[in-house]
Image: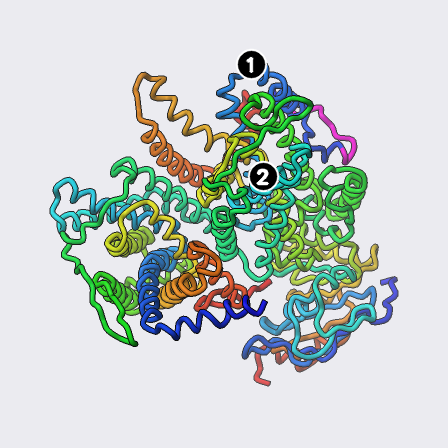
Amino acid sequence: MGKTVGAPILEVEGVSLSFGGVVALQAVTFDVREHEIRAIIGPNGAGKSSLLNVINGFYHPQQGSISFKGRRRRQVDPHEAAQAGIARTFQNIALFRGMTVLDNLMTGRTLKMTSNFLQQALYWGAARREELEHRAKIEEVIDFLEIQHIRKTPVGRLPYGLQKRVELGRALAAEPQLLLLDEPMAGMNLEEKQDMCRFILDVNDQFGTTIVLIEHDMSVVMDLSDRVAVLDYGRKIADGAPDEVRRDQAVIDAYLGVAH
Amino acid sequence: MTHLLYSIFVDPFVQMGAAPDLLAQTLWEGLVSGVLYALIALGFVLIFKASGVFNFAQGIMVVFSALTLVGLNEHGVPAYLALALTVVVMLVLAFAVERVILRPLVNQPDIILFMATFGLTYFLIGLGELIFGGDPKVMISDQLRLPGGSYRIPMLGGYVQMQKIDIAATVIASLMVAALAIMFNRTRIGRALRAVADSHKAALSVGISLEQIWVIVWFAAGIVAIATGIMWGARSNVSFALEIIALKALPVLILGGFTSIPGAIIGGIIIGVGEKIGEFYWGPLLGSGIESWLAYVIALVFLLFRPQGLFGERIIERL
Amino acid sequence: MLYREVGQYKTSYGADQALFPILQDRIGIAVILLLAFVGVPLTASSFTIDSILIPVLVLSLAATGLNLLTGYTGLLSLGTGGFMGVGAFACYKLTTFFPNVNIIVLILCSGFFAAAIGTVFGLPSLRIKGFYLAVATLAAQFFLSWCFIRVAWLYNYNVSASIEVPTKTLFGLAVTGPTASPVTRYLIVLSIVALLTLMAANLVRGRIGRTWMAVRDMDLAAELIGIRLYQTKLLAFAVSSFYCGVAGAMMVFLWLGNAESESFNINQSFLILFMVIIGGLGSLLGSFLGAALIWGLPIVLRAAPAFFGVSIRSATAEQASFVIVGALIIFFLIVEPRGLARLWQIGKQKLRVWPFPY
């Protein structure tokens, strides 16, 4: 691979989450090392998206803590998470449908824009400079993801595969240190999946971004990831290199639905 | 300062205790207006429950139906025939609304449909004024054989006066609510209505005719509107000012939820009673006319504690 | 063919992001501004200025304010009339307290009062969303309407509970009050509206506009990107109310010359909302188009019968205009839910390829 995986950048410790009577996560502990590609797999309803939501601060767990870059929190504040450098994509695309691709990507850079209200209203000084600076940065992302031709298209009009790509672009626009991808290849055909794999690998390779990936397609998981964690009914049942996990009996049972 | 605190937190209750019959009277008045608000809210609930549309025009439908009734009578049509004809008019209106507004807009987001009902409101206001003129009219209570006069009931050291028409209104409203609740929950049509409210596409796919359902439900709302119009008109008179009063149904819906028939009644009563008590005992502190906004503030306060209303379903947002 | 962009290359991001990147648009705007600032004062009649141009400009500003809140940020508001009233009464009180300060300064300051009140009534937006928030704005509207009657201090204890505008001058010319000429008032209104619209356009295409639209489209995702929802919503309330407040102050001081509390009641709120709906939610151009249509329609209706030699009572024309406006709203929502502005855009698209069909 030619990359060096560093120390743990994200540590999830003993996180338990439930909604009313439904237990989504039970004492889940896992870590993510810097620069690695970490996959989370498991049958449907295992709590994978909930885990990402907890890391992001969208859900607050009843127990446990999340440490990112050394800062430990019981409950993550979404704004703080974004500031600290966590970005993500969503299972059911969460793009801003009323805006163009360009605008969606620009929203990804909101936190980096600091011009005040008056400067914005007069489009003067820092406001103008920022717009142009960040536009230049966005264009790099656009080039990287090969979406130049749809820059000014309202995202609502794009086909599903391209929307997913734009969503990745919005996350990348924030120049995150940790990228959370929730089923980035769901609903894609083979070609689109290959493109997406290529992008994910390039992001990890060129920018050194740490990636946590939820995915169902086993071949993708085996190819891309450095380590894999397996969730089932909210509990972590396996954790390790892809090959080990694939042969783990508990994992096989979980996917085949054997009572356990 | 203590005088201010006293007059807000203590004095009104002292006054309530000093004249309990007056309190009972105020409570009764509040109950009655609450029931009438609830009737208007009921019209909203019916349409919302079955089509997901917030029918802003419900208020004007109340006025329009009352105007039609009185207008026909003015032209010499006997009262009960006029009533029957008004029912027909509301049926025609239901068909027209379904054909012209609902069908073309079937897949649009709710906000668009809501705004279409704005358009309908203005349309009916203009039409009503053109046909019947803009002056307030007197409801034909006598011709409809609605009970007049009042009972004077001695109680609590004084007496409470109850207008017979108010009692009739309460009874009729309760009957209507019961009938509608039964229809929604026990009959096949009711089930179809609930299916349509949940998802148009799914309902279509099981063979429910959306058009039929919508006509039925707008017609039902029209009937409720007629009843409301008669009751309101009998207590005051029939004018376009009633349209604004219909906006009061909104706080009722907030409290009671947009899809709950019993909720509309309970919400209506809370708002009606709250308003009257607030106006009577706390009004003098602030000046008159606080009932123009008190209901909304009550609803607002409720919303701050329960953003989905008293009976509304908690919305769990998923990402 | 007229509208082809061929040959107009943008060689910098700045040029691409300009307000009017297409040359034909720039020429068009220049022409419109020229007509507005120079052509109208020279050629239009006082009637046109007083009854059509000034009202449409003032109402467009209010519609812009509402559009920022409802169209761009997705927060439905039924309190527009009330916020306009706050601006109007604030301006009136300011002229009472500071009779020697320039009236334009006072008009702009009264916007800030409206912004403050608007922010207060926007506070519930933290907990309450969507349609329920609209009811909170209704509470604001009815409460403010009540204040405009009950709080006599606002109209200087005038017995008739209305306010009369004093004569104010600027550079020796009367600009408000009975002696101010329509042209003077028109030019001031035009300048203020042009300036504030420009600011709105800048806001909307920049970071703030994007955060507003993000909140409108998917607030949960916006939050996870790091956008602070509460502050974004409150800012929208504040800016929107500022615009409505200035519009209200202008309505009293530069258009009607007087006002009473009824001028700022719930019907005013609905009127502005219709303008925004028909004109196009989320479009600044739409605010102007909607205002022009809704204001102009009754005037056309009243004039049309006379034009054809038929006489109709003005009350009937008024009622007919209700019917037609109502029908128009429904018609537009069916045909083009995104309003006149969208129709305009489609028209421009067709112009691009005209005379070819596609």
Q: Quadrant of the N terminus of chain B?
A: bottom right
Q: Nearer the viewer, residue B274 or C203?
A: B274
Q: Classify residue C8 by image quadrant.
A: top right
Mark 2–mark 1 Cα distance, whole angstroms, equals 32 Å
Q: Nearer the viewer, residue B224 or C156?
A: C156
Residue span colored magenta = C5-14
Q: Position of residue B217 (x, y in %)?
A: 30, 55
Of marks 2 and 1, the one in the foreground: 2
In the picture of the structure, the residue carrying the numbered disc 1 is: C43
Q: Residue at x 47, y 70 (%)?
A: B11
In the picture of the structure, the residue carrying the numbered disc 2 is: C92
Classify mark 1: helix, strand or loop.
helix
Q: Tag 1: Cα neighbours inside 10 Å, few (<14), some, or many (≥20)?
A: few
Q: Residue at x 55, y 33 (%)?
A: C165
Q: Position of residue A35 (x, y in %)?
A: 83, 64
Q: Position of residue B232 (x, y in %)?
A: 28, 54
Q: Position of residue C94 (x, y in %)?
A: 63, 40
Q: Classify residue B198 by image quadrant.
A: bottom left
> Can marks 2 and 1 be said to lie on one chain?
yes
Classify mark 2: helix, strand or loop.
helix
Amino acid of disc 1? Thr
From this viewpoint, is residue C2 visible?
Answer: yes
Q: Is residue C7 magenta?
A: yes
Amino acid of disc 2? Tyr
Q: Is residue C132 magenta?
A: no
Q: Nearer the viewer, residue A143 or B87?
A: B87
Residue B42 placement, left or right of C209: left
Q: Is residue A152 above or below residue B219?
A: above
